Amino acid sequence: MNTVLATPLTRDDVQGVYAGLRPLLAGESDATSKLSREHTVAHPVPGLVVVAGGKYTTYRVMAKDAVDEAVHGLDQRVAPCVTEDTPLLGAEGYRALWNARARIAARTGLHVVRVEHLLNRYGSLTEQILDLVAADPGLGEPLAAADDYLRAEIVYAASHEGARHLDDVLTRRTRISIETFDRGTLSARECAELMAPVLGWDDHQIEKEVAHYEKRVEAERESQLQPDDLTADAARLGAPDIVPI
């Protein structure tokens, strides 16, 4: 970045970092940039279909290819795949809502940028978020320490998206853990208190959820100071998973 910026950045300017492993298919070159990003489907033994490689963004194609391979072993004819014409949740009606975003903003009292944020995240399911705000206008306010997100989104994660713990919301249902300098620790208590009525948490469980998340972030920070992957993994796993409820 600093090769093109007039004001150089330092490590202190980094707000979030994430990395991952991709299951690349083996090839002649050891350079990962030259290995195939595609997936392959195999039927090594009767009754077993295996998918290798691929990536999350092409999961529907992977699923189609896997099912197409699986049905070869059936004794009945199966209709052609329709996944290309099946809208994802939130896709149906999205364009009409996007065109009406200014009217939605006027109707709900939210800034149009907020409405765009919701539409980009939830599509036509945005109406469910807006219903929460209509029932409790306080949910239309942004989180104090992560103001890109509305309080209603935290409630929605617990009520509609299957979130059961605080880190489900801060690291998976939202991107707060990688989009804020504090990694979501400053939002932890507010989010836990929003989730509590939905999930039936008492004060003890709220404290437990917040403490677990803070330990998790502390362990992640410690892991990033280690000299190698082995010790980094050991440090990261220093925060045990919270006991399911």
Image (cartoon, helix red, strand yellow):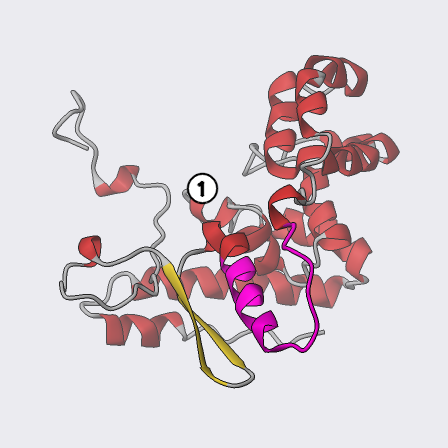
> Looking at the image, which is closer to me, 242 or 122?
122
- The N terminus: image quadrant: top left
Q: Mark 1 belongs to which amino acid?
A: Glu
The x, y position of residue 135, in whole percent, is 87, 35
80 inside magenta stretch = yes
Up-down: is 145 above or below 29? above
The x, y position of residue 243, in whole percent, is 63, 77
> Looking at the image, which is closer to me, 230 or 57?
57
Q: Which residues are magenta?
A: 62-82
Up-down: is 103 above or below 7? above
Up-down: is 118 above or below 106? below
Q: Quadrant of residue 118?
A: top right
Q: Quadrant of residue 152?
A: top right
The x, y position of residue 156, in whole percent, is 73, 46
Residue at the spot 60% in from the left edge and 37% down from the top edge: 121
Q: Which residue matches tag 1?
A: 179
**Is 104 displayed left or right of 237 in the figure?**
right
